[in-house]
Image (cartoon, grey):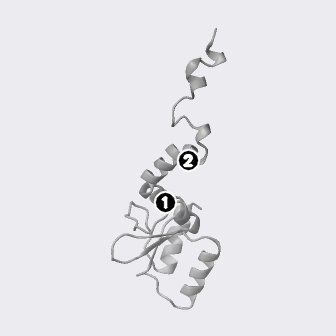
Amino acid sequence: MTDAFYYQSLARHLGVPFVSDAVALGPGARYPHSIHAGVAPLAGDGHPRWLVAPRGEMLAVLLRRRQSGETMSESLAIATPAHLSRLVRAAAAPAIAREASFALANRDPALSAKSGASPANAASPPQSWRR
């Protein structure tokens, strides 16, 4: 059974939409927290308000809520964990790129080339370059 089939079946059982296309996430989506939590807000004031890829306890809670008769079609849409992850990463791409570019320099400038070569490094090439 594929993830897509499982989550599409879950969405049908819960009576909520299944999302497999691109959708706009709301400003409350946080990388990587939304991926780990399996939930991200959807953009706009419409319905549904949340995109979820439930696992573990969240899945059990949603199934119990449905069994008790609760309708969730206005609040939730279901996606696979991989699709939710892609959407969150795409929305956070500029922040991810910034972190990848500057994390080392911010954590330990001595290990980064951001500030340029030290006087010792600039004076002579590394031993391995010499023939």
Give the total number of marks visible in the rendering. 2
Location of the C terminus (image quadrant):
top right
SS of the residue at dot 1?
helix
The residue labelled by disc 2 is 106
How far apart are labels 2 and 1 at the CA level? 31 Å
Instruction: Please tell me which of labels 2 and 1 falls first in the chain.
Output: 1
Q: Nearer the viewer, mark 2 or mark 1?
A: 2
Return the x and y of residue 30 as percentages of the image width and height: 49, 64
Question: Identity of the amino acid at label 1?
Answer: His
Residue found 52% across the figure and 66% down from its top: 34
Residue projecting furthest to the top = 131
The answer to whether 130 appears left or right of 86 in the picture is right
- Viewer-proximal residue, 16 or 121? 121
Q: Amino acid at mark 2?
A: Asn
Q: Is residue 74 left or right of residue 53?
A: left
The residue lying furthest to the left in this view is 45
Q: Residue at x 46, y 53 (%)?
A: 95
